[in-house]
Image (cartoon, rainbow, N blue to C red):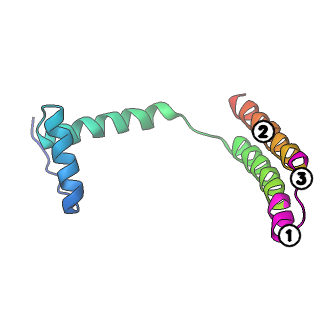
Amino acid sequence: MSYKEIRITVKPDDYERIKNAAHAKNLSMSAFIRSLADVTIDDVRNRGTIDCEQLVELIYHLKKIGGNINQIAKKLNYGDDVSSRFLLQQLLIIQKTLKEAMHDCQN
């Protein structure tokens, strides 16, 4: 088996962190970086993909959440008295929207 060389440049503090982490695992720096690459590559393979419909649905839910956050910010910025009841209502709406988004993306 022939090997290919990969060169990377890192800042001195990053180099020390990598060196220390490799040493803690009793690995050479090369072996340590290869192990990180293996984990990352496997993670990417197992992630799956999101289709366009899911993406559109997610954007819809994020816009709804953004609208709720904007309502809160507007009241705070204008110096309006923001009641804890109003904040709780808005947070419950955001929570409901997040649950809907999670449900939609799981189906």
Give the crowd class for mark 1: few <14, some 14-19, many >=20 residues within 10 Å.
Answer: few
For image coordinates 17% across by 56% down, the residue present is 7
Q: Secondary structure at mark 2?
A: helix
Lateral position of residue 79 relative to residue 2, left or right: right
Viewer-nearest of discs 1 and 2: 1
Residue located beneath label 2 in the image: 95
Give the crowd class for mark 2: few <14, some 14-19, many >=20 residues within 10 Å.
Answer: few
Q: Position of residue 15 (x, y in %)?
A: 19, 54
Question: CA gap, disc 2 to disc 3?
Answer: 18 Å
Proximity of marks 2 and 3: CB atoms separated by less than 8 Å: no
Residue located beneath label 3 in the image: 83
Question: CA gap, disc 1 to disc 2?
Answer: 25 Å
Kind of residue at disc 3 = Ser
Proximity of marks 1 and 2: CB atoms separated by less than 8 Å: no
Give the crowd class for mark 3: few <14, some 14-19, many >=20 residues within 10 Å.
Answer: few
Lateral position of residue 85 relative to residue 14, left or right: right
Question: CA gap, disc 1 to disc 3?
Answer: 12 Å
Q: Secondary structure at mark 1?
A: loop
Q: Which mark is residue 79?
A: 1
Which residue is at the front of the view, 95 or 29? 95
Q: Position of residue 14 (x, y in %)?
A: 24, 55
Q: Main secondary structure of the magenta part?
A: helix
